[in-house]
Protein backbone atom coordinates (compact mmCIF):
# COMPACT_ATOMS: atom_id res chain seq x y z
CA UNK A 1 0.00 0.00 0.00
CA UNK A 2 1.18 3.51 -0.84
CA UNK A 3 0.42 4.80 2.62
CA UNK A 4 2.80 2.22 4.10
CA UNK A 5 5.76 3.56 2.17
CA UNK A 6 8.76 5.02 3.97
CA UNK A 7 10.63 7.88 2.38
CA UNK A 8 14.23 6.99 1.55
CA UNK A 9 15.15 10.64 2.18
CA UNK A 10 14.02 10.78 5.83
CA UNK A 11 11.09 11.94 7.94
CA UNK A 12 10.58 15.21 9.83
CA UNK A 13 10.92 14.67 13.58
CA UNK A 14 7.56 16.41 14.18
CA UNK A 15 4.66 18.13 12.42
CA UNK A 16 6.10 21.47 13.52
CA UNK A 17 9.10 20.93 11.28
CA UNK A 18 6.72 20.51 8.33
CA UNK A 19 5.04 23.75 9.44
CA UNK A 20 8.41 25.51 9.51
CA UNK A 21 9.34 24.03 6.12
CA UNK A 22 6.06 24.87 4.41
CA UNK A 23 5.94 28.34 5.98
CA UNK A 24 9.53 28.92 4.92
CA UNK A 25 8.61 27.87 1.39
CA UNK A 26 5.63 30.24 1.38
CA UNK A 27 7.38 33.20 3.05
CA UNK A 28 9.66 34.75 0.48
CA UNK A 29 10.57 38.08 -1.04
CA UNK A 30 6.98 38.69 -2.15
CA UNK A 31 5.68 38.57 1.43
CA UNK A 32 8.00 41.39 2.44
CA UNK A 33 6.72 43.93 -0.07
CA UNK A 34 3.96 42.64 -2.35
CA UNK A 35 1.15 41.53 -0.05
CA UNK A 36 1.32 44.53 2.33
CA UNK A 37 1.34 46.91 -0.63
CA UNK A 38 -1.60 45.13 -2.28
CA UNK A 39 -3.55 45.36 0.97
CA UNK A 40 -2.90 49.08 1.19
CA UNK A 41 -3.91 49.76 -2.40
CA UNK A 42 -6.95 47.47 -2.73
CA UNK A 43 -9.01 48.42 0.28
CA UNK A 44 -6.92 47.57 3.34
CA UNK A 45 -8.82 45.37 5.76
CA UNK A 46 -11.50 44.65 3.15
CA UNK A 47 -8.82 43.28 0.82
CA UNK A 48 -7.37 41.17 3.64
CA UNK A 49 -10.80 39.57 4.18
CA UNK A 50 -11.15 38.86 0.45
CA UNK A 51 -7.63 37.45 0.40
CA UNK A 52 -8.36 35.14 3.34
CA UNK A 53 -11.49 33.97 1.55
CA UNK A 54 -9.43 33.23 -1.56
CA UNK A 55 -6.90 31.35 0.59
CA UNK A 56 -9.72 29.20 1.99
CA UNK A 57 -11.35 28.53 -1.39
CA UNK A 58 -8.32 28.22 -3.69
CA UNK A 59 -4.99 28.06 -1.88
CA UNK A 60 -5.77 25.75 1.02
CA UNK A 61 -7.50 22.98 -0.98
CA UNK A 62 -4.54 22.71 -3.35
CA UNK A 63 -2.05 22.83 -0.49
CA UNK A 64 -4.02 20.08 1.25
CA UNK A 65 -3.98 18.09 -1.99
CA UNK A 66 -0.20 18.40 -2.40
CA UNK A 67 0.40 17.40 1.22
CA UNK A 68 -1.94 14.41 0.97
CA UNK A 69 -0.31 13.26 -2.26
CA UNK A 70 3.16 13.68 -0.81
CA UNK A 71 2.52 11.73 2.38
CA UNK A 72 0.60 9.04 0.49
CA UNK A 73 3.38 8.52 -2.05
CA UNK A 74 6.44 9.08 0.20
CA UNK A 75 8.58 9.80 -2.88
CA UNK A 76 9.60 12.74 -5.01
CA UNK A 77 6.59 14.46 -6.64
CA UNK A 78 7.34 12.85 -10.02
CA UNK A 79 7.43 9.30 -8.65
CA UNK A 80 4.55 9.99 -6.27
CA UNK A 81 2.21 10.99 -9.09
CA UNK A 82 3.40 8.10 -11.25
CA UNK A 83 2.88 5.43 -8.58
CA UNK A 84 -0.44 6.81 -7.33
CA UNK A 85 -1.75 7.12 -10.88
CA UNK A 86 -0.86 3.50 -11.65
CA UNK A 87 -2.50 2.34 -8.41
CA UNK A 88 -5.66 4.25 -9.37
CA UNK A 89 -5.67 2.68 -12.85
CA UNK A 90 -4.85 5.99 -14.53
CA UNK A 91 -2.07 6.95 -16.93
CA UNK A 92 1.47 7.25 -15.56
CA UNK A 93 1.72 10.39 -17.70
CA UNK A 94 0.22 12.30 -14.78
CA UNK A 95 3.80 12.42 -13.54
CA UNK A 96 4.48 14.96 -16.29
CA UNK A 97 2.65 17.53 -14.16
CA UNK A 98 5.25 17.05 -11.44
CA UNK A 99 8.06 17.18 -14.01
CA UNK A 100 6.74 20.54 -15.20
CA UNK A 101 6.55 21.74 -11.59
CA UNK A 102 10.09 20.56 -10.92
CA UNK A 103 11.42 22.40 -13.98
CA UNK A 104 9.44 25.52 -13.03
CA UNK A 105 10.93 25.46 -9.52
CA UNK A 106 14.47 25.24 -10.90
CA UNK A 107 13.85 28.06 -13.38
CA UNK A 108 12.41 30.23 -10.61
CA UNK A 109 15.38 29.41 -8.38
CA UNK A 110 17.78 30.43 -11.14
CA UNK A 111 16.57 34.05 -11.10
CA UNK A 112 15.40 34.08 -7.47
CA UNK A 113 18.99 33.43 -6.45
CA UNK A 114 20.14 36.52 -8.36
CA UNK A 115 17.48 38.79 -6.86
CA UNK A 116 18.03 37.36 -3.37
CA UNK A 117 21.73 38.01 -3.84
CA UNK A 118 20.93 41.72 -3.91
CA UNK A 119 19.95 41.47 -0.23
CA UNK A 120 23.41 40.07 0.58
CA UNK A 121 25.01 43.07 -1.10
CA UNK A 122 22.75 45.39 0.87
CA UNK A 123 23.65 43.67 4.16
CA UNK A 124 27.27 44.65 3.50
CA UNK A 125 26.23 48.16 2.41
CA UNK A 126 24.13 48.70 5.53
CA UNK A 127 26.92 47.39 7.74
CA UNK A 128 29.37 49.83 6.17
CA UNK A 129 27.02 52.78 6.64
CA UNK A 130 26.70 53.44 2.89
CA UNK A 131 23.06 54.50 3.27
CA UNK A 132 23.40 56.98 6.13
CA UNK A 133 21.82 60.25 4.98
CA UNK A 134 21.28 58.94 1.45
CA UNK A 135 18.80 60.70 -0.86
CA UNK A 136 16.56 59.36 -3.62
CA UNK A 137 18.95 59.95 -6.50
CA UNK A 138 21.86 58.37 -4.67
CA UNK A 139 19.80 55.36 -3.61
CA UNK A 140 18.63 54.82 -7.18
CA UNK A 141 22.19 55.19 -8.47
CA UNK A 142 23.46 52.74 -5.88
CA UNK A 143 20.92 50.13 -6.94
CA UNK A 144 21.66 50.84 -10.60
CA UNK A 145 25.39 50.35 -10.08
CA UNK A 146 24.71 46.97 -8.49
CA UNK A 147 22.56 45.63 -11.32
CA UNK A 148 24.92 47.07 -13.95
CA UNK A 149 27.89 45.10 -12.59
CA UNK A 150 27.74 41.47 -13.81
CA UNK A 151 30.73 40.39 -11.70
CA UNK A 152 29.22 41.72 -8.50
CA UNK A 153 25.86 40.11 -9.26
CA UNK A 154 27.58 36.83 -10.07
CA UNK A 155 29.45 36.89 -6.77
CA UNK A 156 26.26 37.19 -4.69
CA UNK A 157 24.34 34.78 -6.95
CA UNK A 158 27.13 32.23 -6.47
CA UNK A 159 27.20 32.65 -2.70
CA UNK A 160 23.42 32.34 -2.41
CA UNK A 161 23.34 29.16 -4.54
CA UNK A 162 26.29 27.69 -2.65
CA UNK A 163 24.59 28.05 0.74
CA UNK A 164 21.31 26.69 -0.67
CA UNK A 165 23.12 23.68 -2.12
CA UNK A 166 25.03 22.94 1.10
CA UNK A 167 21.78 22.90 3.11
CA UNK A 168 20.08 20.53 0.64
CA UNK A 169 23.13 18.26 0.32
CA UNK A 170 23.18 17.57 4.06
CA UNK A 171 19.82 15.79 3.88
CA UNK A 172 16.30 16.08 5.25
CA UNK A 173 17.12 16.06 8.98
CA UNK A 174 20.74 17.27 9.12
CA UNK A 175 20.30 19.86 6.38
CA UNK A 176 16.71 20.96 5.81
CA UNK A 177 15.33 20.44 9.32
CA UNK A 178 18.36 21.80 11.16
CA UNK A 179 18.55 24.92 8.99
CA UNK A 180 14.81 25.56 9.27
CA UNK A 181 14.95 25.27 13.05
CA UNK A 182 17.44 28.15 12.96
CA UNK A 183 16.18 30.28 10.05
CA UNK A 184 12.47 30.40 10.80
CA UNK A 185 12.73 31.43 14.48
CA UNK A 186 15.34 33.99 13.39
CA UNK A 187 12.90 35.32 10.79
CA UNK A 188 10.12 35.65 13.37
CA UNK A 189 12.42 37.31 15.93
CA UNK A 190 13.76 39.82 13.40
CA UNK A 191 10.22 40.67 12.32
CA UNK A 192 9.12 41.25 15.90
CA UNK A 193 12.16 43.46 16.60
CA UNK A 194 11.46 45.52 13.47
CA UNK A 195 7.80 45.77 14.47
CA UNK A 196 8.78 47.02 17.91
CA UNK A 197 11.10 49.59 16.36
CA UNK A 198 8.41 50.80 13.96
CA UNK A 199 6.22 51.58 16.98
CA UNK A 200 8.79 54.14 18.09
CA UNK A 201 8.87 56.07 14.82
CA UNK A 202 5.79 58.15 15.52
CA UNK A 203 4.15 56.93 12.31
CA UNK A 204 2.92 53.53 13.42
CA UNK A 205 -0.75 54.50 13.23
CA UNK A 206 -0.21 55.92 9.74
CA UNK A 207 1.20 52.56 8.67
CA UNK A 208 -1.73 50.71 10.26
CA UNK A 209 -4.17 53.03 8.50
CA UNK A 210 -2.49 52.36 5.16
CA UNK A 211 -2.70 48.60 5.72
CA UNK A 212 -6.06 48.20 7.39
CA UNK A 213 -8.34 51.03 6.28
CA UNK A 214 -11.61 49.40 5.21
CA UNK A 215 -12.55 50.56 1.71
CA UNK A 216 -15.03 48.26 -0.04
CA UNK A 217 -14.96 50.45 -3.18
CA UNK A 218 -11.40 49.32 -3.96
CA UNK A 219 -12.07 45.59 -3.49
CA UNK A 220 -13.58 44.80 -6.93
CA UNK A 221 -10.32 45.87 -8.61
CA UNK A 222 -8.36 43.67 -6.22
CA UNK A 223 -10.34 40.43 -6.34
CA UNK A 224 -8.23 38.88 -9.08
CA UNK A 225 -5.08 40.19 -7.41
CA UNK A 226 -6.18 38.57 -4.13
CA UNK A 227 -7.00 35.28 -5.87
CA UNK A 228 -3.70 35.22 -7.72
CA UNK A 229 -1.63 36.06 -4.66
CA UNK A 230 -3.56 33.54 -2.52
CA UNK A 231 -2.52 30.85 -4.99
CA UNK A 232 1.09 31.92 -5.44
CA UNK A 233 1.93 32.80 -1.82
CA UNK A 234 1.42 29.25 -0.51
CA UNK A 235 4.09 27.95 -2.91
CA UNK A 236 1.79 25.43 -4.55
CA UNK A 237 2.08 24.18 -8.12
CA UNK A 238 5.77 23.26 -8.20
CA UNK A 239 5.85 20.19 -5.93
CA UNK A 240 7.65 21.79 -2.97
CA UNK A 241 4.74 21.22 -0.59
CA UNK A 242 4.30 17.70 -1.99
CA UNK A 243 7.89 16.72 -1.31
CA UNK A 244 7.76 18.26 2.17
CA UNK A 245 4.52 16.33 2.73
CA UNK A 246 6.36 13.11 1.88
CA UNK A 247 8.60 13.70 4.92
CA UNK A 248 5.62 14.33 7.23
CA UNK A 249 5.04 11.90 10.12
CA UNK A 250 2.09 9.56 9.58
CA UNK A 251 0.28 10.52 12.78
CA UNK A 252 0.29 14.27 12.07
CA UNK A 253 -2.95 16.05 11.20
CA UNK A 254 -2.70 17.35 7.65
CA UNK A 255 -5.72 19.65 7.93
CA UNK A 256 -4.64 21.44 11.10
CA UNK A 257 -1.03 21.62 9.94
CA UNK A 258 -1.84 23.19 6.59
CA UNK A 259 -4.22 25.68 8.24
CA UNK A 260 -1.38 26.71 10.55
CA UNK A 261 0.94 27.25 7.60
CA UNK A 262 -1.59 29.48 5.80
CA UNK A 263 -2.18 31.47 8.98
CA UNK A 264 1.54 31.96 9.65
CA UNK A 265 2.15 33.01 6.04
CA UNK A 266 -0.55 35.68 6.29
CA UNK A 267 0.62 36.85 9.74
CA UNK A 268 4.20 37.23 8.49
CA UNK A 269 3.06 39.27 5.49
CA UNK A 270 0.90 41.58 7.61
CA UNK A 271 3.57 41.93 10.28
CA UNK A 272 6.10 42.87 7.60
CA UNK A 273 3.75 45.61 6.44
CA UNK A 274 3.15 46.87 9.98
CA UNK A 275 6.92 46.92 10.57
CA UNK A 276 8.03 48.54 7.32
CA UNK A 277 5.44 51.10 6.27
CA UNK A 278 5.73 53.24 9.45
CA UNK A 279 9.49 53.41 8.74
CA UNK A 280 8.77 54.52 5.17
CA UNK A 281 6.30 57.18 6.34
CA UNK A 282 8.69 58.34 9.08
CA UNK A 283 11.21 59.22 6.38
CA UNK A 284 8.57 61.21 4.48
CA UNK A 285 8.42 58.70 1.62
CA UNK A 286 5.55 57.03 -0.21
CA UNK A 287 5.27 53.23 -0.35
CA UNK A 288 5.75 51.70 -3.79
CA UNK A 289 5.45 48.19 -5.17
CA UNK A 290 8.16 45.91 -6.42
CA UNK A 291 11.91 45.83 -5.89
CA UNK A 292 11.85 49.63 -5.71
CA UNK A 293 10.39 49.47 -2.19
CA UNK A 294 12.94 46.96 -0.95
CA UNK A 295 16.11 48.22 -2.62
CA UNK A 296 15.52 51.96 -3.11
CA UNK A 297 12.76 53.34 -0.87
CA UNK A 298 13.56 51.39 2.31
CA UNK A 299 17.32 52.10 2.18
CA UNK A 300 16.45 55.82 1.98
CA UNK A 301 14.13 55.41 4.96
CA UNK A 302 16.66 53.49 7.05
CA UNK A 303 19.36 55.97 6.09
CA UNK A 304 17.42 58.96 7.37
CA UNK A 305 15.90 57.85 10.69
CA UNK A 306 17.35 57.24 14.13
CA UNK A 307 19.17 53.90 14.46
CA UNK A 308 18.30 53.22 10.83
CA UNK A 309 21.64 51.61 10.09
CA UNK A 310 21.15 48.94 12.77
CA UNK A 311 17.58 48.14 11.85
CA UNK A 312 18.29 48.38 8.14
CA UNK A 313 20.95 45.72 8.61
CA UNK A 314 18.40 43.57 10.47
CA UNK A 315 15.89 44.05 7.68
CA UNK A 316 18.18 42.81 4.92
CA UNK A 317 19.24 39.85 7.06
CA UNK A 318 15.51 39.12 7.37
CA UNK A 319 15.13 39.32 3.58
CA UNK A 320 18.06 36.94 3.06
CA UNK A 321 16.70 34.42 5.58
CA UNK A 322 13.24 34.53 3.96
CA UNK A 323 14.83 34.04 0.55
CA UNK A 324 16.89 31.04 1.66
CA UNK A 325 13.88 29.39 3.33
CA UNK A 326 12.08 29.58 -0.03
CA UNK A 327 15.09 28.63 -2.15
CA UNK A 328 15.67 25.29 -0.43
CA UNK A 329 12.06 24.30 -1.16
CA UNK A 330 12.62 24.95 -4.87
CA UNK A 331 15.72 22.75 -5.07
CA UNK A 332 14.47 19.82 -2.99
CA UNK A 333 11.93 18.26 -5.45
CA UNK A 334 14.51 17.87 -8.20
CA UNK A 335 17.19 16.54 -5.84
CA UNK A 336 14.78 13.99 -4.36
CA UNK A 337 13.74 12.80 -7.84
CA UNK A 338 17.23 12.38 -9.25
CA UNK A 339 18.48 10.64 -6.11
CA UNK A 340 15.62 8.14 -6.53
CA UNK A 341 16.22 7.75 -10.25
CA UNK A 342 20.01 7.44 -10.34
CA UNK A 343 20.86 6.06 -6.91
CA UNK A 344 23.74 8.53 -6.64
CA UNK A 345 24.50 10.32 -3.41
CA UNK A 346 22.53 13.37 -2.37
CA UNK A 347 25.71 15.47 -2.40
CA UNK A 348 26.50 14.55 -6.02
CA UNK A 349 22.97 15.23 -7.26
CA UNK A 350 22.70 18.51 -5.35
CA UNK A 351 26.02 19.74 -6.72
CA UNK A 352 24.97 18.97 -10.30
CA UNK A 353 21.50 20.52 -10.12
CA UNK A 354 22.70 23.57 -8.18
CA UNK A 355 25.38 24.08 -10.84
CA UNK A 356 22.76 23.93 -13.60
CA UNK A 357 20.63 26.50 -11.74
CA UNK A 358 23.69 28.70 -11.27
CA UNK A 359 24.51 28.60 -14.99
CA UNK A 360 20.92 29.40 -16.00
CA UNK A 361 20.94 32.20 -13.42
CA UNK A 362 23.83 33.84 -15.26
CA UNK A 363 21.30 34.67 -17.97
CA UNK A 364 19.36 36.70 -15.40
CA UNK A 365 22.58 38.37 -14.23
CA UNK A 366 23.36 39.45 -17.78
CA UNK A 367 19.75 40.54 -18.41
CA UNK A 368 20.42 43.61 -16.28
CA UNK A 369 23.58 44.69 -18.09
CA UNK A 370 25.42 42.97 -20.97
CA UNK A 371 22.28 41.39 -22.47
CA UNK A 372 19.86 44.17 -21.51
CA UNK A 373 19.13 44.79 -25.21
CA UNK A 374 18.26 41.15 -25.90
CA UNK A 375 14.46 41.09 -26.16
CA UNK A 376 12.15 38.10 -26.43
CA UNK A 377 8.49 37.83 -27.50
CA UNK A 378 8.52 41.16 -29.32
CA UNK A 379 5.30 42.39 -30.93
CA UNK A 380 5.50 45.54 -33.06
CA UNK A 381 4.60 46.86 -36.51
CA UNK A 382 6.72 44.12 -38.10
CA UNK A 383 4.64 41.42 -36.41
CA UNK A 384 5.47 38.96 -33.64
CA UNK A 385 9.05 37.79 -33.24
CA UNK A 386 10.62 35.45 -30.71
CA UNK A 387 13.89 37.37 -30.38
CA UNK A 388 15.15 40.79 -31.42
CA UNK A 389 18.29 42.59 -30.34
CA UNK A 390 17.75 46.20 -29.29
CA UNK A 391 14.00 46.31 -29.94
CA UNK A 392 11.59 48.44 -27.95
CA UNK A 393 9.18 46.39 -25.89
CA UNK A 394 9.38 42.66 -25.48
CA UNK A 395 10.93 41.00 -22.45
CA UNK A 396 14.45 40.47 -21.19
CA UNK A 397 15.58 36.90 -20.54
CA UNK A 398 14.84 37.40 -16.84
CA UNK A 399 11.35 38.73 -17.56
CA UNK A 400 10.70 35.89 -20.03
CA UNK A 401 11.57 33.18 -17.50
CA UNK A 402 9.50 34.95 -14.85
CA UNK A 403 6.53 35.17 -17.23
CA UNK A 404 6.79 31.53 -18.30
CA UNK A 405 6.97 30.21 -14.75
CA UNK A 406 4.61 32.51 -12.82
CA UNK A 407 1.89 32.93 -15.44
CA UNK A 408 1.93 29.55 -17.18
CA UNK A 409 3.78 26.75 -15.41
CA UNK A 410 2.80 27.44 -11.77
CA UNK A 411 -0.95 27.86 -12.26
CA UNK A 412 -1.03 24.95 -14.71
CA UNK A 413 0.83 22.78 -12.21
CA UNK A 414 -1.54 23.75 -9.39
CA UNK A 415 -4.53 23.01 -11.60
CA UNK A 416 -3.21 19.56 -12.52
CA UNK A 417 -2.38 18.67 -8.91
CA UNK A 418 -5.90 19.65 -7.84
CA UNK A 419 -7.48 17.62 -10.63
CA UNK A 420 -5.30 14.60 -9.85
CA UNK A 421 -6.14 14.66 -6.14
CA UNK A 422 -9.82 15.39 -6.70
CA UNK A 423 -10.60 13.18 -9.69
CA UNK A 424 -7.91 10.49 -10.07
CA UNK A 425 -6.74 8.97 -6.78
CA UNK A 426 -10.26 8.39 -5.45
CA UNK A 427 -12.44 9.86 -2.74
CA UNK A 428 -11.75 7.12 -0.17
CA UNK A 429 -7.97 7.38 -0.57
CA UNK A 430 -8.07 11.16 -0.15
CA UNK A 431 -10.39 10.89 2.86
CA UNK A 432 -8.22 8.24 4.55
CA UNK A 433 -5.01 10.23 4.17
CA UNK A 434 -6.55 13.58 5.11
CA UNK A 435 -8.23 12.05 8.19
CA UNK A 436 -10.17 15.13 9.26
CA UNK A 437 -11.26 15.10 12.89
CA UNK A 438 -14.71 16.34 11.93
CA UNK A 439 -16.02 14.01 9.18
CA UNK A 440 -18.69 16.50 8.09
CA UNK A 441 -15.94 18.83 6.89
CA UNK A 442 -14.67 16.36 4.31
CA UNK A 443 -17.50 16.80 1.75
CA UNK A 444 -16.92 20.58 1.87
CA UNK A 445 -13.14 20.25 1.43
CA UNK A 446 -13.54 17.70 -1.34
CA UNK A 447 -16.07 19.87 -3.19
CA UNK A 448 -13.71 22.86 -2.97
CA UNK A 449 -10.85 20.72 -4.28
CA UNK A 450 -12.81 19.27 -7.20
CA UNK A 451 -14.71 22.33 -8.38
CA UNK A 452 -13.93 25.66 -6.72
CA UNK A 453 -10.12 25.57 -6.53
CA UNK A 454 -9.59 24.42 -10.15
CA UNK A 455 -12.04 27.07 -11.37
CA UNK A 456 -10.24 29.75 -9.36
CA UNK A 457 -6.83 28.70 -10.68
CA UNK A 458 -8.19 28.59 -14.23
CA UNK A 459 -9.47 32.15 -13.87
CA UNK A 460 -6.08 33.29 -12.58
CA UNK A 461 -4.31 31.37 -15.35
CA UNK A 462 -6.37 32.86 -18.20
CA UNK A 463 -6.31 36.37 -16.71
CA UNK A 464 -2.56 36.39 -16.11
CA UNK A 465 -1.85 34.83 -19.50
CA UNK A 466 -3.59 37.59 -21.42
CA UNK A 467 -2.80 40.49 -19.10
Image: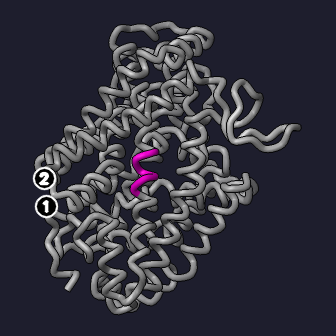
Q: Are marks 2 and 1 in contact (CB under 8 Å)?
A: yes
Residue 464 percent across, percent down from the top left: 66, 55
Which residue is under mark 1? 10
Residue 87 percent across, percent down from the top left: 31, 86
Membership of 34 in magenta stretch:
no
The segment highlighted magenta reads 102-107
Residue 327 percent across, percent down from the top left: 35, 43
Q: Residue at x 52, y 24 (%)?
A: 366
Which quadrant is home to the N terminus? Answer: bottom left
Q: Which secondary structure type mostly characterizes the magenta part of the structure?
A: helix
Label 1: element kind? loop
Query: CA–CA distance between discs 2 and 1?
Result: 7 Å
Which residue is under mark 2? 173
Viewer-closest of 410 and 100: 100
Label 2: element kind? helix
Above or below, comparing residue 395 to residue 80 in the picture: above
Q: Is residue 247 left or right of residue 310?
A: left
Q: Residue at x 79, y 41 (%)?
A: 379
Above or below, comparing residue 200 to residue 5 in the picture: above
Above or below, comparing residue 95 to residue 31 in the picture: below
Viewer-closest of 372 and 251: 372
**How many numbered discs, if any?**
2
Amino acid sequence: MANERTSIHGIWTSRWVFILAATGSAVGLGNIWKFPYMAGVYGGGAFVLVYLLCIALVGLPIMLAETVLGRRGRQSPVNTLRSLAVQAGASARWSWAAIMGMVAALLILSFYSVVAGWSLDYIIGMGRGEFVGIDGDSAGARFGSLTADPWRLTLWHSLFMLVTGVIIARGVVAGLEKSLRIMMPMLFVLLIILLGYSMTTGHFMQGLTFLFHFDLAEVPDGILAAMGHAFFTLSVGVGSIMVFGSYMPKNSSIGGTVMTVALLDTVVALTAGMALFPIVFAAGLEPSAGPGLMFVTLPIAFGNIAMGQVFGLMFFVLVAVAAWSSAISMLEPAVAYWVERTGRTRTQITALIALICWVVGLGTVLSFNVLADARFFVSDDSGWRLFVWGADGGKTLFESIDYLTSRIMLPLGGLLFALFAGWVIGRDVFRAELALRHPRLFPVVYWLLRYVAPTGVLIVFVTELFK
